[in-house]
Amino acid sequence: MARHGFQVNPRVAETRAEFLAAIQEGTWDVVLSDDSMKGFSSTDALRMLRDRDADIPFIIVSGTIGEDAAVEAMRAGAHDYVLKHNLRRLGPAVERELREAANRRMQRSTHAALQASEHRLRHAQRMEAVGRLAGGIAHDFNNLLTVILGFSEFLIEELPENEPTHRDASEIRMAAQRATRLTKQLLAFSRQQVLERRVIDLVAAVSEMQPMIERLIGEDVQFTFNHAEPPQLVLMDPGQFEQVVMNLVINARDAMPGGGRLTVFVDRTRIDSNHAAELEIKPGQYVTLAVSDSGEGIDEDTIDHIFEPFFTTKAPGSGTGLGLSTVFGIVHQSGGGIEVHSVVKQGTTFRVYFPLSGAVAADHEKESPQAGARERASTILLAEDEQGVRAFLEMALKRAGHRVIATPSGTEALAVAERSSDPIDLLIADVVMPGLSGPDVADRLKQRHPTMQTLFLSGYSSHSALPERVTADPGAFLQKPFTVEALLAKVRERLSRS
Ligand SMILES: Nc1ncnc2c1ncn2[C@@H]1O[C@H](COP(=O)(O)OP(=O)(O)OP(=O)(O)O)[C@@H](O)[C@H]1O
Ligand SMILES: [Mg+2]
């Protein structure tokens, strides 16, 4: 064999037990077997080998093998047979079989990689479709909720507090607020929340949350926070980061009803191109947030579905199945990725990767309009195609003392404004309307009303769907549904600019 340039490192097995030990202990490139040995045959040996590895070439080297036995051995999966008086054939046979075994291995791993990537693609497509559905539902509900919330607030204000109808109206408002939270989660999942991105240090952010986390998990769960040297900066919405941590922590707690260990890590990782493809992100530097529990784990059938909205294994009433879908949406909207590793009865680790930000942490406080700033009566032009929302807006603004011109479309708003000789202080317009969109109206009115401010409304706030002139200034945007208070605060803030 050495003559053929092989480096030979052989082991000889004469009995069944020796052969079994050899294939258990070592990794072999090729097995050369006599046809019949002490107490076992080449067919036995072949079977034992195939139970452990399907690829190792098996060549029978025999002085005596007859044609029938040879055919039978080949049928059983031997790759070749060489007669002892014709050993010249052995070297080429080994060479060929090693090559083919390598090919088989390569094919198998290519096939496995292909299957994994198909599986990922199907998963991504399913999430995409569910995301569109969820976003659409949230959009329609936000219009309805704006109306329900708005008018229940009017009722509450008008009805004397001691009347039962006052309480009824409060119940309606409370239910609408709960529904608002649900649609917010759906919007987060479909990556359509409007973000207030800032550079934040994840070590500091988790440290600040530590008391809250400890209260949440209770005394039976031991909490540890491990982290790399701060700061570990990422650019994202701080409120959203908190939601990610809370959802993961609550799930971990729920997986450990009898107590256990919860560990949160913040670390920095380089993601190479293979790993990046799996996570569907770009290769590069990431800050990792890992949440690890010693709980019940997630089985294989379940794990494929955990990020889908409304998927829950919890008892009715104790989980809505929106926690991880919210996390999934937020993470992807922040340019990050998420992966989960779980062993049943041992525990689960969720690992979230956020793109590392190069910027210096800036603690720019959000400018808030001064509370109690005196309200000035202003002229507000309203363009909203949903009748209920329009009626609510008109009423809320008029009650605050403004002059309101309400119109049902962009085209009509434009017509009214072009006729008006009085200045218009503020345009409040839905982003998406049939015909002229809110931003279109704003653009066309700039010349005639140069001091006019704008406020865009939408129940559907995908960054990709919203035109850039809307996302460029998050302050000029109000997400439906909103309360009267939020609306008036936004209006005050807009008007204070003119
Ligand atoms: N740490 C974990 N350990 C075990 N199972 C988990 C863990 N995290 C999530 N799961 C599984 O994933 C499912 C979906 O989680 P998700 O947070 O989306 O919804 P939920 O916790 O059931 O309800 P919600 O978060 O809306 O209250 C859970 O019902 C549970 O089966
Ligand atoms: Mg949850």
Image (cartoon, grey):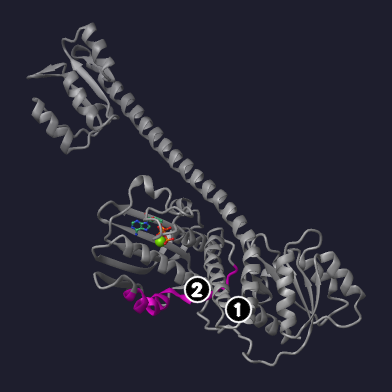
Please tell me the numbered disc located at residue 239.
2
Q: What x and y, as percent, mark residue 87?
A: 22, 17
| 444 w.r.t. 55: above or below | below
Q: Looking at the rendering, which quadrant does residue 242 occupy?
A: bottom left
Q: Which residue is mark 1?
A: 156
Q: Secondary structure at mark 2?
A: helix
Amino acid type, callout 1: Ile
Q: What amino acid type should be assigned to the residue bearing mark 2?
A: Gly
Image spot of residue 107 (x, y percent): 41, 33
Q: Nearer the viewer, residue 223 or 104?
A: 223
Residue range corresponding to the magenta coloring: 194-215
Task: Spot the residue most to the top.
Answer: 67
* Image point (71%, 64%), residue name: 467
Quarter of the displayed picture in which ligand 2 can be seen:
bottom left
Q: Residues within 10 Å of mark 2 (few under 14, many from 20)?
A: few
Residue 119 image position (x, y, % from top left): 46, 42
Between 102 and 148, the residue placed more toward the observer is 148
Gap in Å between the C-alphas at discs 2 and 1? Answer: 30 Å
Q: Is residue 436 left or right of residue 56?
A: right
Asked if residue 208 lies in the magenta stretch, the reply is yes
* Residue 92, percent from left and from top: 30, 22
> Quick check: can you spot residue 12?
no
User: Which of the marked residues, 2 or 1, is nearer the chain's N terminus?
Assistant: 1
